[in-house]
Image (cartoon, grey):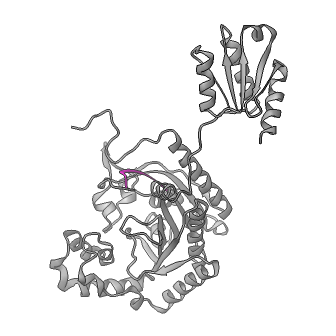
Amino acid sequence: MANKYQVPRGTQDFLGETVSLWQKVETIIREECARYGYSEIRTPIFEHTEVFKTENDSSDMVTKEMYTFNMGDSSLTLRPEGTKGVIRSFVEHKMYGNPAELPQKLYYMGPMFRHERPQKGRYRQFHQFGIEAIGAKSPLLDVEAIALGYDISKKLGLKNIKILVNSLGDEESRNNYRNALREYFKPYLDELCEDCHRRYEQNPLRILDCKIDKDKECFKNAPSIKDYLNESSKEYFALVLKGLDDLGIPYEIDDHLVRGLDYYSNTVFEAVPVDATGQQAAVFAGGQYDGLVNYFGGGDLPGVGFGMGLERMINLAVEQNSLQAETRHSDVYVISLGNVSTYGLQITQMLRDAGYSVEMDYQGRSLKAQFKTSDRLNSKVIIIVGEDECGNKTAQVKDVANKTQETVEFARLSETVGNILKGNE
């Protein structure tokens, strides 16, 4: 039996220096989103189940992995992904009201929940950043979405990232392709897994995304979507590829890329390290969609977006040595000797109010122990106060880098600390 005082399987605590990695990544994401004109949206971590469980959805996320619970007459689900909650909010708040303000460009960041087998890079509570540009359909918007994800990858220092891209075409093209896949896989049904039998009926495109059967011989000769695209879909995709070429974003056309959710149309994409292998390689992925806004009652408005798994991005950046944790430090450490702790606290708070990071001893430890702590915190200035300093309203100020020390009046402490820090930059 699992220890009830440990984190549940598939979850994790973030401690110490690890938190600084997350803060760095979150800062980069917010800065890049601001440059691209995306505003943050924050939706609840649970929604009515119908938000995620749309009609005839064949994805594993909906059929197997959602955390759903009942409260009275309501069925609620912890959000397994970010897009549908954002679209629900977009429609509920009538963000489509002014056509001149479309597309609405939104981003989200926070925890998601899926009950799947925990493994490297996958957790039952995981964190995702994502964008949605809602209300306009354009190859340029698709390219911009890819460019934003690619720029964030570069700002994180990730090396050798390429974009896998494909077109699922418009509704007419997809219907023709679904019919071709049903016809092709019909003789092979006995070879396919139980999930693929369900996908065969609901959405045969999802068969191509199967993790169990993907290496079977019949998959190698499956029809390609490119042979079923109509002219308008071909033209749309050609403009997406031209945009990627013009921006110098490396890509590769993957004819069998369908993505794991059922609402995509036209452009779909995944970003992967060039040397990546296996199903868990994508660092961000998404595509264009046509029917989601209409499903929630907001009319026939398209959108495009992607999701980025933050655990996976951070792990990859650390593995490539492009992201390092910040070492804990303080500008100033205040050492108190004798019965003067309130005076030490007064100095500490005064310097904090002046904008400096300041730590102090709270336990009346020895001078040696307090110096060890100041070393561990990489303090640039050490302030020492004893009973004499307390009585005279002064302090001993030590410049650690230059190994100098002077007596300074309380009123001049902030100025003196500022000069030392500036001189040591």
Of residues 343 and 166, the one nearer the viewer is 343
Q: Position of residue 278 (x, y in %)?
A: 36, 68
Q: Position of residue 138 (x, y in %)?
A: 58, 78
Q: Is residue 356 visible?
A: yes
**Which stretch is magenta?**
122-128
Residue 388 falls in image quadrant: top right
Q: Position of residue 113 (x, y in %)?
A: 38, 51
> Is residue 373 shown above or below 339?
below
> Is residue 255 shown above or below 296?
below
> Is residue 32 shown above or below 216?
above
Which residue extends farthest left?
190
Residue at 41% over, 53% down: 79
Q: Does the magenta stretch include residue 2?
A: no
Q: How many labels does the image show?
A: 0
Which residue extends farthest front?
403
Residue at 60% over, 82% down: 245
Residue 371 falls in image quadrant: top right
Q: Is residue 124 magenta?
A: yes
The quadrant of the rendering that contains the C terminus is top right
Q: Position of residue 296 (x, y in %)?
A: 45, 63
Of residues 252 and 298, the one nearer the viewer is 252
Of residues 115 and 412, the one nearer the viewer is 412
Of residues 263 and 7, the one nearer the viewer is 7
Residue at 64% over, 34% down: 378
Left or right: 25 as drawn, with respect to 263 = right
The quadrant of the rendering that contains the N terminus is top left
Left or right: 123 as drawn, with respect to 145 = left
Left or right: 3 as drawn, with respect to 113 = left
Residue at 48% over, 57% down: 319
